[in-house]
Image (cartoon, rainbow, N blue to C red):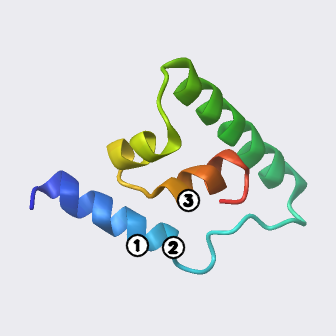
Amino acid sequence: MTAVEADAGRLKGEADEPGWEVDPDDEWGVAVIATVGRQLKLRREAVGMRAAEFGTAVGYGEDMVYKIEGGKR
């Protein structure tokens, strides 16, 4: 396993831990997360990648990509 693969595995585990959800009471935080998610989706679609392909490329699962794009993570 390379250092990149090890880091990707570590990040994937951290993102699945409790506490990474967006606090609905933090209006600025919700707005930033939603904006980042929209931009990520627009750019992913612009290059013709499916969510599963993008997830594999960055070391996350398809579900996590959808959660980020939807502003839930």
Q: Is residue 1 above or below residue 53?
A: below
Nearest to the observer: residue 54 or residue 35: 54
- Dot 2 lies on which element? loop
Q: Badge 3 is on which residue?
A: 63
Q: Is residue 62 left or right of residue 7?
A: right
- Mark 2 is surrounded, within 10 Å at the Cα level, by few (under 14), some (14 to 19) or many (20 or more) other residues, namely few
Q: Residue furthest left?
A: 1
In the rendered view of the protein, which quadrant contains the C terminus? bottom right
Q: Residue at x 45, y 71 (%)?
A: 14
Q: Is residue 70 above or below residue 49?
A: below
Residue 49, given in percent of the width and then of the height, sits at: 47, 30
Q: Is residue 2 left or right of residue 38?
A: left
Nearest to the observer: residue 63 or residue 38: 63
Q: Total marks drawn?
A: 3
Question: CB atoms at circles 1 and 2 under 8 Å apart?
Answer: yes
Q: Amino acid at mark 2?
A: Asp
Q: Amino acid at mark 1?
A: Gly
Counting residues from the start of the chain, the first of labels 2 and 3 encountered is: 2
Q: Is residue 63 left or right of residue 32?
A: left
In the rendered view of the protein, which quadrant contains the N terminus? bottom left
Q: Residue at x 62, y 51 (%)?
A: 66
Residue 22, given in percent of the width and then of the height, sits at: 74, 64
- Which disc is residue 16 wearing? 2
Question: CB atoms at circles 2 and 3 under 8 Å apart?
Answer: no
Q: Residue at x 42, y 56 (%)?
A: 60
- Which disc is residue 13 wearing? 1
